[in-house]
Amino acid sequence: MNAKRLFLIIGLTLIVVLGINQISTTRHGLPASTSASLSTPLASEPPTRVTHTAGRLESAQTAPSDKPGAASTIKQINEDGSETVEDTSGDNGNHNALLAAVASTAAAATTSTATPWIEGTHYTRLVPAQPTSVAAGQVEVLEFFWYACPHCYAIDAQVESWLKSKPSYISFTRVPVLWNEGHRSLARLFYALDSMGKLEQLHSDIFKSIHVSGNMLVAKDASDALGSEQIQTQFVKKFGISESDFKTAYHSFSVETNMQKADQLVQRYRIAGVPTFVVNGKFVADVGTAQSPERLLALVNDLATGEHKH
């Protein structure tokens, strides 16, 4: 519930409260214009006794009853000198009940609009914020990952589903980590296929090869870059990709440039675990902080939405 709607509800409720007070006043034979004088006093104040004499209203204080919820009274002096005493306890109950309803509505509205995400618990704010490389009006979301990471594999299907429904203003980019030679070999495979326009086709198959088939796509000795290249070449050939075209892309200038940029991003954001998401150069979160893969993507979506509104 937004603030405008909350104020409208409170305003309408207060109108009802004032209307009941006015009806109560008229019922006791007093002009509606004097209803303010008859409104129920605060609990800390003694109740007010109002007398009507020769067309004048006079107020006097009477001692409060020592019984909880005791009724307040109105004494009217008639022209013949007789007195009429009336109980007003019903007004007091209605008045307090409606005020309680206003307070309850306000509290419920405040709770419903509260964000479920806590800075420092579910995500970390970067200070200072880092520059992004997206167009104006776009919100950058980076996913740092590693093909051999089981957690990256576990969340990837949900990421793919999220990509189909995410807001158009979110610009999403995967960034492979390059911590050692084994990471670098898989990062080179990623950027080589990307430069060939084949990444979308083979992205999920790379994950499945490693985590389902047990083919790690790198040499047993991770420092053996040539051995890793040969293993990866045999893998892509199964999908109809030319060996020569793949090798050309594998060693291209664009792939080298992209790997350097990825390495700079990993260092800039001090990525120490994967998968890690960075939203608009300002917020960092992972499965651990968000508490589940589903919550992580919901958090990323909410943070990106907040950035877009600003």
Image: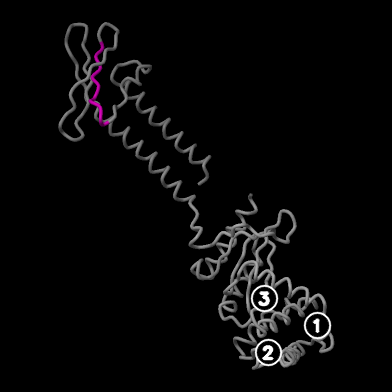
Q: Quadrant of residue 218?
A: bottom right
The amino acid beneath tag 2 is Ser
Secondary structure beneath dot 2 equals: loop
Q: Earlier in the sequence, mark 1 or mark 3?
A: 3
Looking at the picture, does residue 6 appear above or below residue 56?
A: below
- Tell me what residue is drawn at x 67 percent, y 61 percent: 140
Secondary structure beneath dot 1 equals: loop
Relative image position of residue 231 (x, y in whole percent): 72, 92
Position of residue 40 in the picture relative to residue 281 (left or right): left
The amino acid beneath tag 3 is Pro
Inter-mark Cα distance, 3 to 2: 18 Å
Inter-mark Cα distance, 1 to 3: 17 Å
Name the residue beneath numbered marker 1: 251
Inter-mark Cα distance, 1 to 2: 17 Å
Residue 223 circle label: 2
The amino acid beneath tag 1 is His
Q: Which residues are magenta?
A: 43-52
- Tell me what residue is drawn at x 81 percent, y 89 percent: 243
In this view, the mark in front (1 or 2): 2
